[in-house]
Image (spheres, grey):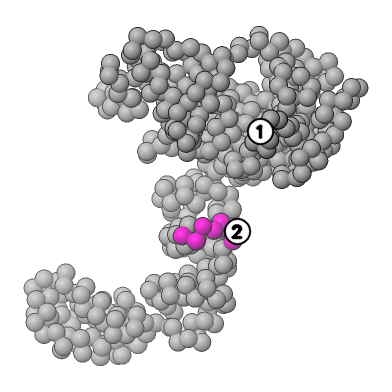
């Protein structure tokens, strides 16, 4: 037991010139709240609009304009807290985080500091067959800044305030992650939970979910090292690359006799390197204080309970149900629940049918074809009803698995009712034992030497089954063919 535990503990270590090193990772995930309007104004949060077209006087920090809290953003934060198995605080406070940047018109960001709306929680991840529980420190609400644009003119920078004031949830993990793979699994899981809840679309391409990655290294079991923060990493693949790159940079400096400076860095995916951005600020540098324009946020226990009662089934619960009720493997269930739309499609296909057979068709045939074509489940030419009908035809014995694949291709390309296509194109499998027996006898007669060999080596019977299926154009019932072949060979 001790040896196994030691092996498990050491699996994530990085080998340096000076021995093994352990990576310590904490993540601050910034997720845009799914809301039609901003956190403190009625301006639209729509993506892709003309620059500065979704800006109110509040967003632009015009004098005398006061923020008004958006209740839907509060509700979305509470729902997310429930989804993260976290404590919900009935009393929370909005603070001013003071710093200057051209795309921050107020000169401060309205955020939450010591009294956030959501407290400690946890997320369960699976990496390489092992399950780990990652702690959540807190979740707080804050407003986003605008966007600086530097590439449209050689002498000027522009500022677009469309994002200014958009509501963000900052989900802060504990430093429980020990590898880039764990960090990627954690962000993937958090994004899946958000999408199931409908509290954020998690679209990293639009900047609706991004992460600040805190990385440090230490000798196994030693004191925590000095951490560096890598800002605004906007893809799960880049998160993994940034962590490994930064960890090796720190290890090289320490092993060369240097010391790590606490700082904020940026990750350059083209060069696969991190580079210094600025020295890392501490909380006191931001001069936090309660925002005088906003009263403390107080929500009732009844409000919190009602939001919890209305939550949808979450990924872990759905996966457990697929395993226990539908008989799926844990792996197949994890594939199916990764996206809520995929899980909904599968459930529509599996309803009233064999769960394992439905899972095989959805994962192998449908997902395989969607991936090949670069399509999402919402773009699938084969509806859940059509795929369910194909599975029914297999279960009834009307068509074989091979014919079913041909039928799937027809429905994918041409559409239509699967049963009607089978009838119109004569695709029903042959179950007439007399006809099948005649074909078996013809194949055996044409291959007498192989027939004799098969009597001594029963595994060769499969070759005859294949020949009979070929001779029948794939329409013969495979099980009936197998039974007759073995009976005729006496094996």
Give the residues drawn in magenta, as a range: 372-379
Q: Residue at x 11, y 71 (%)?
A: 457
Q: Is residue 455 left or right of residue 322?
A: left
| Mark linked to residue 378 | 2
Earlier residue among tags 1 and 2: 1
Which residue is nearer to you in this view: 83 or 139? Answer: 139
Residue denoted by label 1: 154
Is residue 37 shown in magenta? no
Q: Secondary structure at mark 1?
A: loop
Tell me how far mark 1 sits from mark 2, CA to CA: 42 Å
Q: Is residue 91 left or right of residue 30?
A: right
Is residue 378 shown in magenta? yes
Which residue is nearer to you in this view: 420 or 166? Answer: 166
Few, some or many residues within 10 Å of mark 1 (<14, 14–19, 20+): few
Residue 330: percent from the left, percent from the top? 42, 47
**SS majority, magenta:** helix
Image quarter of residue 289: top right
Residue 467: percent from the left, percent from the top? 24, 80
Which residue is nearer to you in this view: 388 or 338? Answer: 338
Image quarter of residue 231: top right
Q: Secondary structure at mark 2?
A: helix
Q: Is residue 410 above or below residue 37?
A: below
């Amino acid at each position: 037991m001790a040896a196994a535990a030691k092996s498990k503990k050491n699996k994530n270590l990085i080998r340096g010139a000076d021995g093994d090193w352990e990576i310590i990772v904490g993540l601050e995930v910034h997720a845009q709240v799914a809301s039609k309007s901003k956190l403190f104004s009625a301006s639209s949060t729509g993506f892709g609009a003309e620059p500065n077209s979704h800006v109110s006087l509040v967003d632009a920090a015009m004098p005398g304009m006061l923020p008004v809290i958006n209740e839907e953003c509060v509700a979305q934060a509470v729902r997310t807290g429930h989804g993260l198995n976290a404590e919900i605080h009935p009393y929370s406070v909005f603070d001013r985080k003071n710093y200057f940047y051209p795309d921050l018109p107020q000169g401060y960001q309205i955020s939450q500091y010591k009294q956030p709306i959501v407290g400690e929680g946890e997320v369960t991840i699976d990496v390489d067959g092992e399950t780990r529980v990652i702690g959540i420190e807190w979740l707080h609400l804050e407003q986003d800044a605008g966007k600086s644009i530097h590439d449209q003119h050689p002498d000027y920078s522009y500022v677009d305030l469309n994002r200014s004031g958009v509501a963000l949830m900052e989900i802060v993990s504990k430093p429980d992650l020990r590898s880039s793979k764990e960090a990627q699994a954690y962000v993937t899981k958090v994004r899946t939970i958000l999408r199931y809840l409908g509290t954020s679309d998690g679209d990293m391409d639009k900047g609706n979910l991004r992460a600040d990655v805190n990385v440090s290294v230490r000798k196994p079991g030693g004191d925590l090292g000095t951490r560096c923060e890598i800002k605004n990493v906007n893809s799960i693949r880049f998160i993994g690359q940034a962590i490994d790159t930064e960890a090796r940079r720190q290890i090289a400096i320490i092993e060369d006799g240097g010391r790590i400076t606490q700082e904020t860095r940026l990750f350059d995916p083209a060069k696969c390197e991190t580079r210094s951005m600025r020295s890392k600020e501490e909380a006191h540098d931001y001069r936090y204080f309660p925002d005088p324009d906003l009263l403390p946020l107080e929500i009732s226990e009844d409000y919190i309970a009602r939001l919890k009662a209305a939550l949808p089934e979450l990924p872990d619960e759905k996966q457990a149900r697929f395993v226990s009720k539908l008989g799926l493997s844990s792996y197949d269930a994890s594939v199916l629940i990764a996206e809520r739309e995929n899980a909904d499609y599968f459930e529509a296909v599996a309803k009233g049918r064999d769960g394992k057979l439905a899972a095989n068709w959805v994962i192998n045939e449908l997902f395989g074809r969607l991936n090949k074509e670069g399509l999402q489940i919402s773009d699938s030419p084969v509806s859940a009803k059509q795929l369910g009908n194909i599975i029914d035809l297999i279960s009834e014995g009307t068509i074989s698995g091979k014919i079913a694949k041909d039928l799937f291709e027809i429905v994918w390309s041409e559409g239509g009712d699967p049963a009607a296509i089978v009838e119109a194109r004569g695709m029903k499998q042959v179950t007439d034992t007399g006809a099948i027996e005649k074909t078996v006898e013809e194949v055996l007669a044409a291959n007498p030497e192989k027939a004799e060999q098969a009597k001594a080596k029963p595994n060769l019977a499969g070759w005859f089954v294949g020949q009979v299926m070929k001779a029948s154009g794939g329409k013969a019932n495979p099980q009936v063919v197998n039974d007759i072949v073995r009976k005729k060979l006496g094996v």
